[in-house]
């Protein structure tokens, strides 16, 4: 049927004296991670879970084999890798993944378009602006005329190099990122639309650096002012003459000149592009003193006391400083050791508390040897980041052992008094109810649930009766005004209190095929 259809179309086209336009050739590439240089953790190549060739399609539900979008181009997927946030990426891992990407791109030239799927906050040991470096080296291979469409996390950084080398760009408009897949799809749709209508590169790219550096926990779009500021992106950009764009908060746990907020807008109408970009930049800047933590925030002891005194259960506590989904090592034991020292939790009938989670491969081995119901005595955590507290000494009963999680490998629950501590072989974020229930835990019935997280992801947010965020130490310390920055641009809000009004006029960047 398919062949007959194609033949019919071809003969129809021949009869009309025209040939059907060949499908555009579009490559897919990208590496995504946010990595903290304030953490001693290091990220290797395996952490990216890189997908090669056609396996790349499985990352994107909108690119399923039978999807309409898949039929609109000849797709050439190369390598796409997404790592859990962590410490800086080794230079070897970065060069290895990038050189494989470049080789794959060289093997299938030429391209009309390239979908560049990145996060934007990768740190690589000994290299500034890795995403800028990556797109420059990709540009060299694919040439100046290929239309590149970049999709990013709003916590990524848009350096001038990245902005100059990409043609189209967009990012998430929600934090937590419930629109992640929708954003990637929009980046692909933007690309297809410009190739289909023959307009190609946008006539104008406006880029505005904004001297603000904030943690994501202060710019959640669940609450004001970020709710309105980011809520305005879509209506502001929905105009004839504008293609896409966005507001980038940037990433505060790396110390480079590119770490700050940015607004970028692309389109063909210079006035509209500039005006929209300036409007968004002014709105983000004007709201600066209103950005605050998304939940009540206090020291660990005050937060735990509040949770114990509260009648609201489950009471969630964010152990924020070691949030592995922001770049923390995930094995800081500072909060866990404080829990183990509290007398309230010593007896089995004390307040029930689930602690998610701590990596402890040796303790996991002991738990496997003891079996469910068995007794364990061993240490967990502080292998990667032991700066704040030593390994936690857990003496208790094994309640469950579950194998096969992509991130954790093996997960066990160890009961110590009234604490249920999740001990994993490798670090894993706990964001969903099933992450708990599959281990036999009942977070809805627990008095307190402690998670290494900043703002709660949607399922836990919906489950919470109470919630506070604890200012704990770690690689993504939320108290960023106490971090030592040497290389970010100054003045910068909130570090320089009496800074002058910044220049928020749109900078028009040259098209990617004209500036070199
Ligand atoms: Zn993010």
Image (cartoon, rainbow, N blue to C red):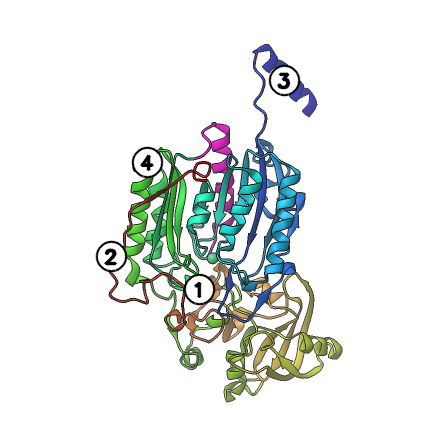
Residue positioned 42% across, 56% down in the render: 258
Residue 338 can be seen, yes or no? yes
Based on the picture, tell me whether residue 181 belongs to the magenta stretch: yes
- Compared across the picture, whether 249 is left or right of 101 comes to left
Magenta: main secondary structure = helix
Q: Nearer the viewer, mark 3 or mark 1?
A: 1
Marks 1/2 in contact by CB < 8 Å: the verdict is: no
Residue 291 x, y percent position in the rendering? 33, 62
Query: Tag 3 or tag 2, which sits nearer the N-term?
Result: 3
User: Label 3 belongs to which residue?
Assistant: 10
Q: Badge 3: few (under 14), some or many (20 or more) residues near its Cα, within 10 Å? A: some
**Closest to the observer: 451 or 291?**
291
User: Label 4 belongs to which residue?
Assistant: 270
Query: Tag 4 or tag 3, which sits nearer the N-term?
Result: 3
Quadrant in the rendering for residue 439: bottom right
Label drawn at residue 501: 2
Label drawn at residue 255: 1
Seen as rendered, the residue at the extreme right is 369
Residue 204 x, y percent position in the rendering? 37, 37
What's drawn in magenta, residue-wise?
177-201
Q: Nearer the viewer, mark 1 or mark 4?
A: 1
**Closest to the observer: 335 or 88?**
88
Q: What is the CA distance from the residue labelled 1 to the residue labelled 2?
A: 23 Å
Q: What is the CA distance from the residue labelled 1 to the residue labelled 4?
A: 33 Å
Q: Secondary structure at mark 3?
A: helix
**Closest to the observer: 174 or 33?**
33
Q: Secondary structure at mark 2?
A: loop
Marks 3/4 in contact by CB < 8 Å: the verdict is: no
Query: Tag 1 or tag 3, which sits nearer the N-term?
Result: 3
Quarter occupied by the N terminus: top right
Seen as rendered, the residue at the extreme front is 516
């Amino acid at each position: 049927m398919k062949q007959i259809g194609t033949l019919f179309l071809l003969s129809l086209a021949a009869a009309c004296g025209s040939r059907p336009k060949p499908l555009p050739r579009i490559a897919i590439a990208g590496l995504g991670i946010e990595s903290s240089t304030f953490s001693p953790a290091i990220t290797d190549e395996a952490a990216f879970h890189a997908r090669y060739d056609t396996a790349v399609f499985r990352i994107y539900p909108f690119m399923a084999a039978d999807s309409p979008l898949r039929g609109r181009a000849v797709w050439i997927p190369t390598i796409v890798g997404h790592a859990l946030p962590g410490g800086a990426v080794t230079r070897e891992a970065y060069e290895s993944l990038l050189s494989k990407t470049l080789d794959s791109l060289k093997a299938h030239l030429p391209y009309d378009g390239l979908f560049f799927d990145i996060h934007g906050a990768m740190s690589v040991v000994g290299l500034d602006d890795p995403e800028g470096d990556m797109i420059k080296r990709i540009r060299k291979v694919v040439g100046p005329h290929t239309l590149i469409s970049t999709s990013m996390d709003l916590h990524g950084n848009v350096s001038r190099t990245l902005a100059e080398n990409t043609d189209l760009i967009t990012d998430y408009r929600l934090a937590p990122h419930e629109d992640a897949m929708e954003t990637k799809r929009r980046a692909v749709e933007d690309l297809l639309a410009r190739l289909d209508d023959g307009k190609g590169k946008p006539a104008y790219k406006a880029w505005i650096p904004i001297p603000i550096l904030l943690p994501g926990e202060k710019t959640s779009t669940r609450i004001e002012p970020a709710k309105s500021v980011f809520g305005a992106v879509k209506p502001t950009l929905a105009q004839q003459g504008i293609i896409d764009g966005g507001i980038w908060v940037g990433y505060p746990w790396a110390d480079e000149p590119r770490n700050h907020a940015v607004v970028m807008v692309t389109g063909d109408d210079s006035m509209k592009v500039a005006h929209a970009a300036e409007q968004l930049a002014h709105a983000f800047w004007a709201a600066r003193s209103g950005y605050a933590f998304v939940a009540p925030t206090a020291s660990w002891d005050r937060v735990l006391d509040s949770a114990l005194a509260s009648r609201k259960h489950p009471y969630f506590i964010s152990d924020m400083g070691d949030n592995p989904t922001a770049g923390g090592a995930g094995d800081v034991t500072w909060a866990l050791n404080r829990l183990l020292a509290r007398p309230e939790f010593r007896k089995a009938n004390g307040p029930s508390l689930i602690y998610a989670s701590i990596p402890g491969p040796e303790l996991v081995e002991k738990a496997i040897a003891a079996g469910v119901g068995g007794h364990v005595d061993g240490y967990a955590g502080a292998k990667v980041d032991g700066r704040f507290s030593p390994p936690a000494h857990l003496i208790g009963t094994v309640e469950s052992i579950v194998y096969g999680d992509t991130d954790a490998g093996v997960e066990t629950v160890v009961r110590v008094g009234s604490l249920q501590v999740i001990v994993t072989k490798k670090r894993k974020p706990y964001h969903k109810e099933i992450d708990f229930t599959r281990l036999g835990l009942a977070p809805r019935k627990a008095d307190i649930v402690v998670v290494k997280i900043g703002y709660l992801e949607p399922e836990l947010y919906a489950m919470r009766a109470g919630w506070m965020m604890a200012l704990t130490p770690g690689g993504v310390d939320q108290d960023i005004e106490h971090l030592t920055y040497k290389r970010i641009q100054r003045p910068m809000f909130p570090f320089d209190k009496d800074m002058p009004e910044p220049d928020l006029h749109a900078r028009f960047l040259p098209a990617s095929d004209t500036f070199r």
